[in-house]
Image (cartoon, rainbow, N blue to C red):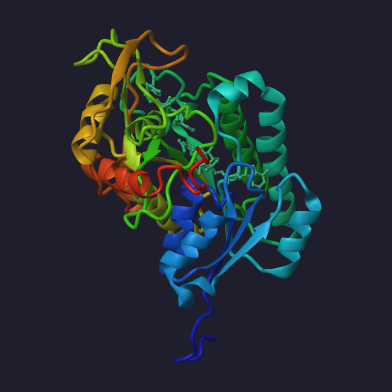
């Protein structure tokens, strides 16, 4: 029985991959919403400094609710350690490898990391009776969509090993939930996350040459790369370049809070997928122009042939997330580019110090 005046314990969330791009922004929002957060990350594509900066933004009081574990989901000893120490109410599962090109060159690495890591996570969640998960899926599961906007009940398709890991993991989630109805799982299909926290203290910091458009543009703007290659100028679109649904990472972070609340309040959620996008498409050349406007920098670009495997236009139907999660993206490309530039101009080398000349 609840005793009046007695403070309820804050809910405790395990965030896998919480040192990464989307993870850090989500952890910050979770702390602000009063959750207790444990992060597990092997720092394969991130640095602990990013978690320290989350603490700095959150302030000393909220930071007391954040614990960081250096660990790998493929290592069951790491999972045993973390699950035996803390009781979790839910898991947000970001940890995974995400570079499409690398997944083609090293498929075994992707299957090993993304699939084994997730299977281990299910094993320990089951063992410790935590059966609520928010899983990072991707618009990649729509392949090259025949129709747009992409609606959650479209037939899914994978175009590369990375995409196949997301497709398999969505199917595995469905099977796990079907076999044991105590599970509540939300699959979030992100479109193209960009931008950064408004403080400019956390943001995306890819290793090596960026694969994705906005980190590439950002590195041209700060002088780390000389010119942007625009892949494709003969698409049947208004300016010939390809169209995507770019979404501010803070909107995405808030989408995870909405998904968690849905998990906690909906007994019969089963295993349900939601798109997280803005619902509107922007071309590559429009993004270049928006970034130039926000940064005051000229972005030199070269029109190049299409990138193999790219779709002409991909954007989300946002109706289901709006209706069922009560969530909708707030920010447009102007704010996305403003915050991306704020992060880039304050941290031209990301979390690393500039190289010695
Ligand atoms: P990210 O690489 O910045 O973050 C992923 C984090 O997971 C990294 O910090 C990495 O060190 C960690 N990690 C990887 N394998 C691990 C393992 N075995 N054990 C522990 N930690 C591990 O990537 P992100 O952009 O923040 O993406 C987060 C999730 O969202 C990923 O699953 C990704 O596939 C998915 N996603 C990303 C995008 C995007 O464009 N950024 C789009 C759709 C879906
Ligand atoms: C966007 C547009 C490029 C770089 C990828 C993954 C997807 C998801 C999000 C994880 C395309 C063009 C890009 C460049 C360019 N990630 N481009 N010059 O391909 O929509 O989606 O990230 O799940 O799975 O496939 O994003 O940012 O790579 O490309 O012209 O240097 O920008 O051709 O039209 P994409 P992107």
Q: At x 23% / y 42%, what residue is drawn? A: 332
Relative to 53, say whether 170 is above or below: above
Q: At x 57% / y 20%, what residue is drawn? A: 160
Which x, y percent locates residue 128? 72, 62
- The front one of 322 and 179 is 322
Give left or right: position of 237 versus 99. Answer: left
- The front one of 55 and 348 is 348
Give left or right: position of 91 versus 179. Answer: left
- The front one of 143 and 291 is 291
Q: At x 60% / y 34%, what residue is drawn? A: 171
- The front one of 245 and 143 is 245
The reply to whether residue 79 is visible in this rendering is: yes
Relative to 169, say whether 300 is above or below: above
Q: At x 38% / y 8%, what residue is drawn? A: 305
The quadrant in which residue 262 appears is bottom left
Which quarter of the frame holds ligand 1? top right
Q: How many marks?
A: 0
In the rendered image, the residue lying farthest to the front is: 357
Which x, y percent locates residue 234? 28, 7
The quadrant in which residue 340 appears is top left
Relative to 338, say whether 300 is above or below: above
């Amino acid at each position: 029985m609840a005793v009046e005046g007695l403070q309820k314990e804050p809910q405790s969330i395990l965030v896998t991959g919480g040192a990464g791009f989307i993870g850090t922004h989500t952890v910050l929002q979770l702390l602000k919403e009063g959750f207790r957060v444990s992060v597990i990350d092997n720092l394969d594509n991130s640095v602990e400094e990013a978690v320290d900066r989350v603490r700095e933004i959150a302030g000393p009081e909220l930071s007391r609710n954040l614990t960081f574990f250096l660990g790998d989901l493929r290592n069951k000893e790491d999972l045993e350690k973390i699950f035996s120490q803390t009781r979790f109410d839910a898991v947000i599962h970001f940890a995974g490898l995400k570079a499409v090109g690398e997944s083609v060159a090293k498929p075994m690495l992707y299957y090993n990391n993304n699939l084994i890591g997730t299977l281990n996570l299910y094993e320990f969640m089951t063992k410790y009776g935590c059966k609520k998960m928010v899983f990072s899926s991707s618009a990649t599961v729509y392949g090259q969509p025949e129709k747009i906007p992409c609606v959650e009940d479209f037939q899914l398709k994978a175009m590369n090993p990375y995409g196949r890991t997301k497709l398999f993991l969505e199917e595995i989630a469905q099977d796990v939930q079907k076999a044991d109805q105590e599970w509540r799982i939300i699959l979030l299909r992100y479109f193209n996350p960009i931008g950064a926290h408004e403080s400019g203290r956390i943001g995306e910091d890819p290793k090596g040459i960026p694969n994705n458009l906005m980190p590439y543009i950002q590195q041209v703007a700060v002088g780390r790369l000389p010119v942007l290659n625009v892949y494709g100028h003969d698409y049947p679109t208004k300016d010939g370049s390809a169209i995507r649904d770019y979404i501010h990472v803070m909107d995405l972070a808030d989408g995870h809070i909405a998904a968690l609340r849905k998990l906690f309040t909906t007994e019969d959620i089963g295993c349900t997928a939601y798109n997280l996008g803005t619902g509107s498409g922007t071309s590559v050349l429009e993004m270049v122009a928006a970034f130039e406007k926000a940064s005051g920098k000229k972005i030199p670009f070269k029109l190049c042939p299409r990138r193999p495997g790219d779709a002409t236009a991909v954007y989300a139907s946002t109706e289901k997330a709006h209706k069922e999660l009560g969530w909708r993206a707030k920010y447009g490309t102007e704010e996305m580019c403003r915050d991306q530039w704020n992060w880039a101009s304050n941290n031209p080398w990301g979390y690393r110090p500039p190289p010695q000349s």
